[in-house]
Image (cartoon, coloured by chain):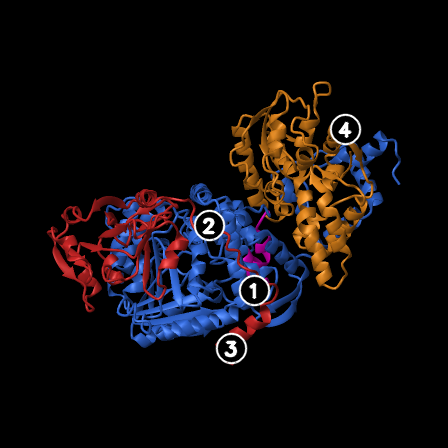
């Protein structure tokens, strides 16, 4: 099977190790991975801040970069939700505003082929035990867009639970937002920080060594808060845990 | 052009107001305790009904269908209410509604009214208008009483005094009740039971002598003219049945076509709101009972219904924003909102706080003033509000839509007129940054160069950023910059030079 | 232009788009129950919200009502209450008259009524001002309400079934437990302005 990796702009620039982990994981599972270099950003920051028209070229770019791939996989629930929920809306609005149906057609073509990593693993590849090894205590924060927009459900936790050596502890109040929210973190820094502090308190209380997530933007907020506070709790993207094996453990 | 007046003075932008609330430890604890309690209860009450999603879809469709034919259903309602002995008035805005009500009260010769909790009359600022006309309006809902005694503002749709804890309420009752009527007992404690008893005794004399009452309504049934009020304490029943004159001020979107339609909302509203299978009391009445004869002699002999627009028709004109008119004021979205929980209701600068307020206020009032221009950003778009909404209002969708209106301007309807508004002030730098980011992101070559520059300068990464970036680094460390980007790793690893 | 015309014309300009069909595929009842199960569920849900539930048959009713009313000196009686219900009760009967003032009703300790129907799934009794229920105020002002439900005939499963059987033009009062408030810290407290004690008598009328 062949799949294109949509690594996302945040992972490309700041968390390449997550992208690398996805490549290693998928290849280990027999998937041939491609990285179309024309990709960049899904346009979510622009769209969610109110600059819909600025997100249109990025819709076009993303759709064209992944044209022809049966499977597009992304290690970000938030970017997957942007494509699945908002691309059709952007296309519809452009058509309503008399700017043609090209964007709508691009969106319609792309949307059914895009899957968040855990969806791809569980639904397309049909695996929950990916042969990973990670001998640590882990708690999982399901980011909002993965949880509520995509409806990932227990897929991430099932994948984690099948990891050899891993002890999964439930995060109290897991469904509550961490307070990142894109430009929310800058526009409403006090509320954002308060939400982050509460999320971290909950994670600390579990006694876990690792706070795992499936969205590096949320983790950047949580990790930044943890490090500023000098907390030893470590954040990790789910893909990095799933990529780790006994032969090649995570450093 | 000014927006619709929701009876509130100017408020600071949301982030400023929220900052104060976030650092108020008592308020944070009060809100956390209350919202978490009700959140879990609601989830259990909803889980009891295995057709919840279908009830939600039906509620949504009933409201959408009604809004599509709102003119027809309002006329049908008017005819039915009139046939049952009531009188229907139409108010374009808050001032007109207040004028109508004030005139009706004055005409009775009375100088005091008892009030059932009503969002519509809070929205119009009716109490202040009545006071200016020399009429005393007594709020009879316990939480509204707490707010009124404290000269405070409501901070929650269902529980306007949610920001107060039992100790604060006891102190308020002790110091203030005597000024309005029967004082609180000297030795009043802070047990909610004792506090409720003090309110019972304080308000009893007012109920028994009241000649005029003012209410809102949860639903109005077009085919029969039946009004519906859901409540818990019995203050609603007191106001709706004992006085001689009853005046109900109701938003035009509260109409439903048929009596049967209530079968949906009477299941979804109590469970969403107070997390009960059914609220203690629901009163349904049709006019004064004359005409049909069935209710004659039971309840008020004069009934006036004031139908309120006040920005609702303008909201209806917006294809995305109009879904906010489906709202049945249950407040489930407030109770699950992580931003509301920390910012508190007052930060929203409106009688409608929380997620629904963040989409209603900027539509009813416009986005011209600082609070309304910042409300659409008072959310992380986490979607918890949409998930619990019993009429499936996609609040995140409306928020993003209103953000666009704030930063880009565009067509809106104001007082029935289609106008094009200009972008709000203060977004010039942001607009430029968004555009620059897009230009960079739309050119992978430039993006790669930028990433390499960042990587090369990674050791220079500061601990704190200046300007807008401070909002990040005040409480968070910046992420480490990697030695190479993913795309460079890929190119190197796969030995496939990038174009 | 009148305000009415202005609002209607604004609506006509504003309303647009699709007109959805209302899906009515939600459940009419949430479980299939025997009459006895339905009555048991009603009792359980009434009890959940702090109503006190009693069961009796026609022979035991006068004794039961006499006991429930024994703490009060007077009891309000709706015009059409079956006389035998109170045949053993001690308190003075007060009859509601058109000119009975709220203050006068406030001096009465208790009220006994029948009902229009009861809803098992929500633990609700509904009054419609029928002859054995009287005006709405008589079940509001006294601090103690005894409501007699004829079972199983007056018990429906669900809210949709209840609405089918009710006449919307009558003044309707839906009662689910004694008055309550959650206004202090969202903590539920029973007993505010309405009757603080609600006794529901399930009268076996088979």
Q: Magenta stretch? A: B359-380
Q: Chain of mark 1?
A: B
Q: Quadrant of residue C194?
A: bottom left
Can residue B154 be seen by looking at this rendering?
A: no
Q: Which residue is mark 4?
A: A30
Farthest front residue? C206
User: Is the residue under label 2 in contact with that under label 1 (CB below 8 Å)?
Assistant: no
Q: Which residue is mark 1?
A: B315
Q: Secondary structure at mark 1?
A: helix
Q: Chain of mark 3?
A: C
Q: Secondary structure at mark 3?
A: helix
Q: Chain of mark 2?
A: C
Q: Which residue is mark 3?
A: C5
Farthest bottom residue? C1
Q: Measuring 63% from the left and 54% from the top, which residue is drawn there? A: B400
Q: CA distance from mark 3 to mark 1?
A: 18 Å
Q: Measuring 62% from the left and 49% from the top, which residue is drawn there? A: A187
């Amino acid at each position: 099977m062949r799949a294109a990796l949509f690594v996302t702009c945040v992972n490309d620039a700041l968390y390449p190790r997550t992208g690398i982990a996805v490549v290693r994981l998928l290849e280990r599972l027999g998937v041939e991975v491609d990285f179309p270099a024309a990709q960049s950003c899904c346009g979510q920051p622009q769209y969610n801040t109110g600059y819909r028209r600025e997100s249109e070229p990025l819709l076009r770019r993303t759709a064209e970069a992944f044209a022809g791939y049966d499977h597009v996989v992304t290690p970000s629930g938030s970017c997957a939700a942007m494509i699945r929920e908002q691309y059709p809306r952007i296309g519809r609005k452009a058509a309503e505003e008399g700017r043609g149906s090209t964007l709508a057609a691009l969106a319609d073509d792309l949307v059914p082929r895009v899957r968040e990593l855990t969806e791809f693993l569980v639904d397309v590849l049909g695996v929950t035990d990916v042969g990973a090894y990670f001998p640590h205590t882990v708690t999982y924060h399901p980011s909002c867009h993965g949880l509520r927009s995509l409806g990932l459900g227990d897929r991430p936790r099932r994948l984690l639970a099948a990891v050899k050596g891993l002890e999964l502890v439930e995060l109290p109040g897991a469904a509550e937002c961490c307070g990142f929210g894109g430009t929310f973190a800058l526009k409403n820094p006090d509320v954002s920080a308060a939400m982050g502090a509460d999320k971290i308190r909950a994670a600390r209380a579990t006694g876990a060594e690792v706070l795992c997530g499936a969205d590096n933007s949320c983790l950047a907020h949580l990790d930044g808060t943890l490090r500023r506070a000098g907390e030893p709790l470590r954040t990790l993207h789910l893909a990095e845990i799933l990529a780790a094996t006994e032969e090649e453990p995570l450093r | 052009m000014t927006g619709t007046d929701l009876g509130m003075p100017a408020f600071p932008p949301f982030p400023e107001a929220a900052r104060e609330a976030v650092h108020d430890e008592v308020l944070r604890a009060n809100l956390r305790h209350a919202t978490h309690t009700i959140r879990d209860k609601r989830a259990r009450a909803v889980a009891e009904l295995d057709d919840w999603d279908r009830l939600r879809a039906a509620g949504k469709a009933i409201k959408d269908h009604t809004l599509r034919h709102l003119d027809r259903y309002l006329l049908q309602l008017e005819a039915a209410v009139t046939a049952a002995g009531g009188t229907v008035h139409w108010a374009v805005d808050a001032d007109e509604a207040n004028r109508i009500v004030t005139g009706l009260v004055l005409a009775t010769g009375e100088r005091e009214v008892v009030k059932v909790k009503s969002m519509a009359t809070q929205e119009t600022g009716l109490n202040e208008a009545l006071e200016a006309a020399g009429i005393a309006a007594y709020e009879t809902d316990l939480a509204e009483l707490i707010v009124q005694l404290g000269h405070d503002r409501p901070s929650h749709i269902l529980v306007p005094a949610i920001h107060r804890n039992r100790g604060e309420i006891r102190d308020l009752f002790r110091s203030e009740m005597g000024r309005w009527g029967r004082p609180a007992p000297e030795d009043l404690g802070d047990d909610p039971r004792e506090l409720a008893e003090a309110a019972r005794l304080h308000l009893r004399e007012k109920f028994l002598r009241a000649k005029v009452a003012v209410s809102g309504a949860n639903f109005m049934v077009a085919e029969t003219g039946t009004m519906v009020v859901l409540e818990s304490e019995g203050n609603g029943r007191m106001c709706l049945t004992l006085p001689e004159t009853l005046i109900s001020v109701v938003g035009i979107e509260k109409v439903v076509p048929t009596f049967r339609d209530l079968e949906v909302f009477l299941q979804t509203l109590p469970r969403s709101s107070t997390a009960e299978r059914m609220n203690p009391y629901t009163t349904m009445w049709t006019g004064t009972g004359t005409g049909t004869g069935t209710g004659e002699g039971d309840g008020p002999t004069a009934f006036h219904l004031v139908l309120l627009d006040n920005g609702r028709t303008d909201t209806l004109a917006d294809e995305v924003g109009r879904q906010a008119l489906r709202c049945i004021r249950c407040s489930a979205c407030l109770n699950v909102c992580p931003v509301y929980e920390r910012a508190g209701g007052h930060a929203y600068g409106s009688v409608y706080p929380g997620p629904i307020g963040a989409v209603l206020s900027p539509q009813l009032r416009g986005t011209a003033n600082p609070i309304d221009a910042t409300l659409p950003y008072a959310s992380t778009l986490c979607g918890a509000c949409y998930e619990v909404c019993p009429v499936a209002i996609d609040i995140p969708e409306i928020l993003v839509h209103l953000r666009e209106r704030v930063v880009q301007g565009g067509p809106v309807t104001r007082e029935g007129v289609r106008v094009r508004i200009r972008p709000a002030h203060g977004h010039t730098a942001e607009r430029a940054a968004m555009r620059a980011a897009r230009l960079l992101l739309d050119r992978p070559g430039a993006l790669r160069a930028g990433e390499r520059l960042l990587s090369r300068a990674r050791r220079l990464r500061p601990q704190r950023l200046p300007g807008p970036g401070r909002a990040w680094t005040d409480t968070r460390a910046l992420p480490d910059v990697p030695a190479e980007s993913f795309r460079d790793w890929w190119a190197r690893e796969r030995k496939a030079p990038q174009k | 232009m009148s305000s009415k015309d202005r609002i209607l014309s604004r609506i006509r300009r504003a309303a647009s788009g699709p007109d959805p069909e209302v899906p009515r595929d939600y459940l009419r009842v949430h479980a299939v129950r025997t009459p006895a199960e339905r009555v048991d569920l009603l009792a359980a849900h009434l009890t959940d919200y702090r109503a006190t539930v009693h069961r009796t048959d026609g022979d035991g009713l006068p004794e039961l009502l006499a006991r429930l009313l024994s703490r009060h000196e007077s009891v309000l009686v709706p015009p059409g209450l079956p006389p035998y219900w109170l045949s053993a009760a001690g308190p003075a009967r007060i009859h509601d008259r058109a000119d009975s003032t709220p203050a006068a009703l406030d001096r009465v300790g208790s009220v006994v009524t029948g009902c229009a129907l009861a809803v098992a799934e929500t633990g609700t009794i509904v009054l419609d001002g029928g002859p054995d229920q009287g005006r709405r105020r008589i079940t509001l002002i006294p601090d103690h309400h005894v409501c007699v439900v004829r079972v199983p005939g007056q018990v429906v499963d669900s809210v949709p079934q209840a609405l089918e059987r009710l006449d919307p033009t009558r003044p309707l009062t839906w009662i689910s437990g004694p008055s309550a408030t959650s206004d202090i810290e969202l903590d539920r407290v029973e007993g505010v302005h309405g009757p603080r004690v609600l006794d529901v008598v399930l009268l076996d009328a088979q």
